[in-house]
Amino acid sequence: MEVRLGQLLVQSRVLTQQQVEQILHEQTHCGEPFGLICERMFSVNPSAVEDAWAMQYVSLTRKVDPLREVVDSHALELVTRRQAWQFRVLPMRFDGDELMMATTASHLRRALRFANNVIAVPVYLVLAESQTLGEAMCKHYPLPGMTPASINDDGMDRLLGDRNLRAAG
């Protein structure tokens, strides 16, 4: 059963069921995305819509073990080591014209933003457990100081933040 964005926003108490009905009615007339209408009609914070969308995506996408999946070197070339660790993504292979890229559920929002804003080809994300993604990242994108456990800490974020502060100063 598909989890609807409106249901998730009601469950998280961002919208009421009546507001969802109003949004759906408006959507039939204007054709805009549900989340955009939420923001416009009810001043819903875009972050709340993004959170709900990420929960919906988690329920729809498949789970993989990146240590057992085929990883194509051409896919790996699309992302630098720094990007892979910063955004917690592992490009694995092309599925037709789309790039299959793994991330964790907790890093899905960040990975989606990166995929939409940086990768020049269509991307779909699959989910991996933190430990196995970390191990695969160490194998394909070795970076000094990074271990499989680094997937769950913000060491890379601190490192990049420190560099950005020094560069700005």
Image (tube, helix red, strand yellow):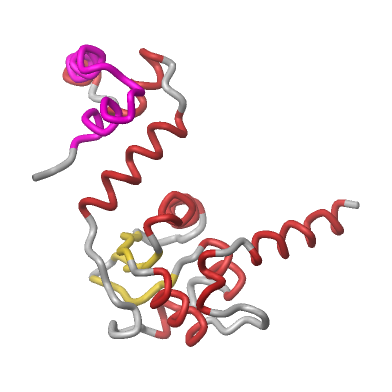
Which residue sits furthest right?
Answer: 169
Residue 90 coordinates in the image, percent (x, y) = 43, 72
Q: Is residue 43 magenta?
A: no
Q: Is residue 104 above or below residue 145?
A: above
Asked whether, in this view, residue 128 is left or right of residue 116, the answer is left
Residue 137 coordinates in the image, percent (x, y) = 48, 78
Specify the segment rendered in magenta: 4-26
Residue in the picture at 36% in, 84% down: 72
Asked whether, in this view, residue 154 is left or right of residue 25, the answer is right
Figure label count: 0
Residue 9 coordinates in the image, percent (x, y) = 30, 29
Residue 138 coordinates in the image, percent (x, y) = 52, 83
Viewport quadrant of the N terminus: top left
Give whichever of 158, 28 is nearer the camera. 158
Q: Is residue 13 magenta?
A: yes
Residue in the picture at 50% in, 51% down: 117
**Secondary structure that dominates the magenta span:** helix
Q: Is residue 40 above or below residue 79?
A: above
Give whichever of 96, 67 is nearer the camera. 67
Q: Is residue 104 above or below residue 141?
A: above
Residue in the picture at 41% in, 54% down: 108
